[in-house]
Amino acid sequence: MIIKELIETLSTLDPELRVVTLGYEGGYDDIEWPAGKNSPNVINLALHVNPAWYYGNHEMVSEDHQYGDNIQIVKAIVL
């Protein structure tokens, strides 16, 4: 999903709805920005690099990891 799609979807909802994410082993947690920040983290994301079902499809790019030329790297926000 890209920001444009997120905005379009969110604009159809009640602006007073709470935003949550799944808890580690159950339940739900509020979405919070990292300590001291007023906005989400923007990261570089390597797309479709984790083939195992138990990992998310994408991975944050680290300086010490090299990806092949065919891996697409995009900017993303973390909620």
Image: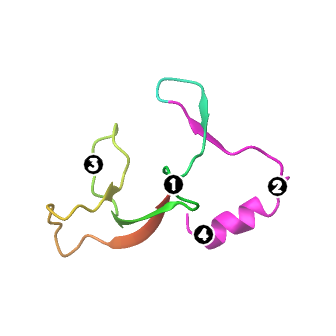
Camera-side residue of 77 and 9:
77
Question: Dot 4: what SS?
Answer: helix
Give whichever of discs 2 and 1 has the lower sequence position.
2
Q: Which of pointers 4 and 1 indicates the residue nearer the eye?
A: 1
Residue 67 quadrant: bottom left
Few, some or many C-alpha atoms within 10 Å of disc 3 (few <14, some 14-19, many ≥20)? few
Residue 36 circle label: 1
The residue tagged 2 is 13
Instruction: Name above or below for residue 33 compared with residue 69.
Output: above
Q: Which of pointers 2 and 1 indicates the residue nearer the eye?
A: 1
Q: Position of residue 35 (x, y in %)?
A: 49, 49
Residue 12 is inside the magenta segment:
yes
Q: Is residue 14 left or right of residue 25?
A: right
Give whichever of discs 4 and 3 has the lower sequence position.
4
Residue 3 circle label: 4
Q: CA distance from mark 4 to mark 2?
A: 16 Å
Residue 79 circle label: none
